[in-house]
Image: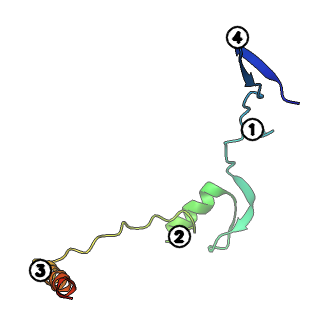
Amino acid sequence: MIELIEIAPGRFRVARPLYEPARSQLPSPHVISDTMDAVEQVDGRFYESKRQFRAVGRALGLTEVGTEKFKPKVRGTDTKRVREERRAALRASVERYAAS
């Protein structure tokens, strides 16, 4: 059933339910727990804390998939000669196209 509301004489709008943000039934939905099931790290010990598990992995030089930080890509630094060769090649292509 569509409900209309008169907002001014002769002007109506459709009544829509108020927006309710998506909420979890958990008491703190945006908090990630530090606890986890006991997991063995490569040192043979079991860890129940994510923080300790990750600290041991970092100390051993391991990379946790999904949390690694990649080095920024460095653009190639063209030498003056390379830029001039590129411009000459483009100029020659344009001249050949214009001549045809």
Proximity of marks 1 and 3: CB atoms separated by less than 8 Å: no
Q: Nearer the viewer, residue 76 or 29?
A: 76
Identity, as a three-letter code, of the amino acid under mark 1: Arg
Of pointers 4 and 1, the one earlier in the residue sequence: 4
Label 4 belongs to which residue? 9
Q: CA distance from mark 3 to mark 2?
A: 43 Å
Residue at x 77%, y 18% (from the top left corner): 5
Q: Earlier in the sequence, mark 4 or mark 2?
A: 4
Q: Amino acid at mark 4?
A: Pro
Q: Work out how far the residue at label 3 is from the one at label 4, CA to CA, in angstroms.
A: 72 Å
Instruction: Using the rendered view, name the quadrant where residue 94 is placed.
Output: bottom left
Q: Earlier in the sequence, mark 3 or mark 2?
A: 2
70 vs 97: above or below: above
User: Which numbered disc, 4 or 2, marks the residue closer to the eye?
Assistant: 4
Q: Which of the two residues, 45 or 75, is positioned nearer the viewer here?
A: 75
- Numbered label attached to residue 23: 1
Report the residue at 18% width, 76% height from top: 78
Q: Position of residue 58 (x, y in %)?
A: 51, 65
Q: Name, please, the residue furthest toward the top.
A: 9
- Could you tell me which secondary element the residue under label 1 belongs to? loop
In primary-sequence order, the first of circles 1 and 2 is 1
Determine which residue is flagged by label 2: 63
Q: Are marks 4 and 2 in contact (CB under 8 Å)?
A: no
Amino acid type shown at disc 3: Glu
The spot of residue 87 in percent (x, y) is: 15, 79
Element carrying mark 4: loop
